[in-house]
Amino acid sequence: MEDHTWDANYWKIKSYWPNILFTDTLRDFYKKHLMLRNQWHLSEAIDLVKMKYVTFGTNPPEFKHFLEEYDKVAKDRQLNVGAYTTPSNKYWVDFEKPSPHTGVMSRYSTDAPDFKTASEIALKTNGRVRNQRTIETENCITDLNNTPREKVAEAVKQLRDEGMLSKDELPSDFALWTPLAQGRVVCRIQNPKKKAIA
């Protein structure tokens, strides 16, 4: 297995370009500008520099080539966390069945392209259908259940006074509230309105 440390990458550079005389100054320059970078990406960038740029004699490749290739590799490997959100129309089915190897009951989850297909799978496997909205709703219900009833009642009263929540009676079970009511109450609990000073 290839070692991905600065020392390994430095030796890789020296072995790819054996004619280069690495003076202390040149070695320190390379170390200063390459050592704190991701060494996995740097290793790949060094390979790319070796493949793309021909050098002659004791001249190393231009230093900018290492940085350019490193930036390309780093950009290719970058995980764009904020770019993907789970669509609210994607469904999963959670179910249990015996493991084919041990016979012990195990939990499984499978995705489905739409609600109808998910419902059919759930019916066959005695499973539970969920989607992103279900997860968000469950989080709201958990937050409400973990909050003292007095705080929930206070938030409901404030929202009703502001006309943000219906005056209709809410069930005692938070799961029976509409997602809108759950979300607004949780938001108010997490961001309480400041009382005006008289």
Image (cartoon, rainbow, N blue to C red):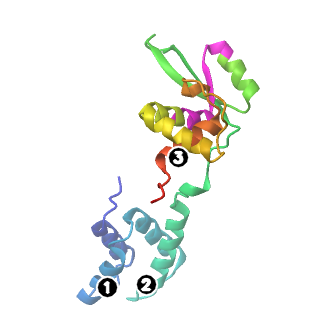
Residue stretch in magenta: 123-139
The residue where tag 2 is placed is 63
For residue 151, above or below residue 63: above
Q: Nearer the viewer, residue 138 or 130?
A: 138
Circle 3: residue type: Arg
Q: Horizontally, is 129 left or right of 40 in the view?
A: right
Residue 134: give x, y in percent of width and height: 61, 32
Q: Which residue is mark 1?
A: 29
Q: Can you say whether 113 is above or below 31 in the image?
A: above
Dot 3 falls on a residue whose secondary structure is helix
Whether the residues at callouts 1 and 2 have beta carbons within 8 Å, the answer is: yes
The residue shown at (58%, 36%) is 182
Q: Position of residue 45 (x, y in %)?
A: 46, 70
* Residues tagged 1 and 3 counted as in contact (Cβ below 8 A): no
Q: Could you classify mark 1 by the number of other residues whose Cα lies within 10 Å: few (under 14), some (14-19), or many (20 or more)?
A: few
Alpha carbon separation for disc pair 2 and 3: 55 Å
Among numbered discs 1 and 2, the one appearing first in the sequence: 1
Tell me the CA gap for discs 1 and 2.
10 Å
Give above or below for 42 relative to 185: below
Closest to the observer: 192 or 98?
192
Residue 125, horizontal then vertical, whole percent: 62, 14
Which label's residue is closer to the chain start, 1 or 3? Answer: 1
Q: Main secondary structure of the magenta part?
A: helix
